[in-house]
Amino acid sequence: MIEIKKLSYKYPGASKLALDNINLSIDEGQYIAILGHNGSGKSTFSKLLAAIYKASSGKILIDGIEINSENLKEIRRKIGIVYQNPDNQFIGSTVEDDIAFGLENKNVPHEKMEGIIKNYATVVGMVDFLDREPQNLSGGQKQRVAIASTLALDPKIIIFDEITSMLDPKGRDDIYKIIHELHSKTQKTLISITHDMDEALLADKLIVFSGGKVIAEGKPIDILKNKNIIEIAKIDSPFIYKLSEMIKGVEPTYDGKELLEKLCKLK
């Protein structure tokens, strides 16, 4: 479980807070989407959660352990993070070497390493690419390798920091499927920092940031129906909603199945 209490952060030299008095609770095994426009505070929040930044005030507790300088190693073992640009995470000369890098740092025996690498490469659909050089992969393939490298370290919490923003539609869909599989088959807590409303609809819980504050949290479909929140947060409507708005005689909806049922009734 993650507890955030009165969390605030100000960048050095800044005149105003980047995060202002954040209070949140995230249960183990939840899939959380965090939405907000540029400068809303969502990426700053992810870096505090990953113990990359130190809070100006307030606290973050993970499994009851407060993030501070005394227990950074223990906290960082619990958290994995996948970044927007996978090129920034590549270390190895091949896909296999890259997934192995973190395991070597953890002193995992080589006889165990091969099985771990193949297992997580299979999970992300990259087992046939283990001997490839990362720079020769597509953007979506690179991001899948970055996810495998993180999974290999077996963190309890995984933060996805806008990992689909540089991908084409097929690449995004592949990543969404992997996240869905992880959510349905593991107890890992998944936190996705995103600007993609279609992804947000897949989460258990949506948290919306604006101006360094949390302005909404709850079920995605309930929040996305609140036009006031959408306007304040400057976030776009999901594709399904836009499509339903264009169809004469159909009330706009965020639910794909509901839209299909409404279309059938038009006949």
Image (cartoon, rainbow, N blue to C red):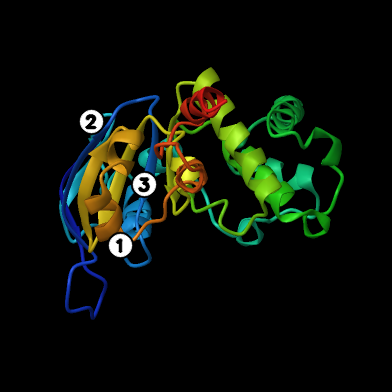
Q: Amino acid at mark 3?
A: Ile
Q: Which mark is residue 124?
A: none
Q: Position of residue 259 (x, y in %)?
A: 49, 31
Report the quarter where the C terminus lies: top right
For marks 3 and 1 on the same chain, the one whose residue lies earlier in the sequence: 3
For disc 3, the neighbor class at 10 Å (few under 14, some 14 to 19, many from 20) is many
Q: Residue at x 25, y 44 (%)?
A: 226
Q: Secondary structure at mark 3?
A: strand
Q: Residue at x 48, y 33 (%)?
A: 155
Q: Secondary structure at mark 1?
A: loop
Q: Position of residue 27 (x, y in %)?
A: 30, 27
Q: Gap between marks 3 and 1, in whole Å?
A: 11 Å
Q: Gap between marks 2 and 3, in whole Å?
A: 22 Å
Residue 48 falls left or right of residue 106: left
For disc 1, the neighbor class at 10 Å (few under 14, some 14 to 19, many from 20) is many
Query: Which residue position holds label 2?
Result: 64
Query: Which residue position holds label 3?
Result: 34
Outermost residue to the top: 185
Visible in this render: residue 41? yes
Q: Position of residue 115 (x, y in %)?
A: 74, 25
Confirm or deny contact between disc 3 and disc 1 (CB under 8 A): no
The label nearer to you, 1 versus 2, is 1
Query: Which residue position holds label 1?
Result: 40
Q: Residue at x 26, y 71 (%)?
A: 11
- Please tell me which residue lies in front, 205 or 161: 205
Quadrant in the picture for residue 123? top right
Q: Amino acid at mark 2?
A: Gly
Q: Amino acid at mark 1?
A: Ser
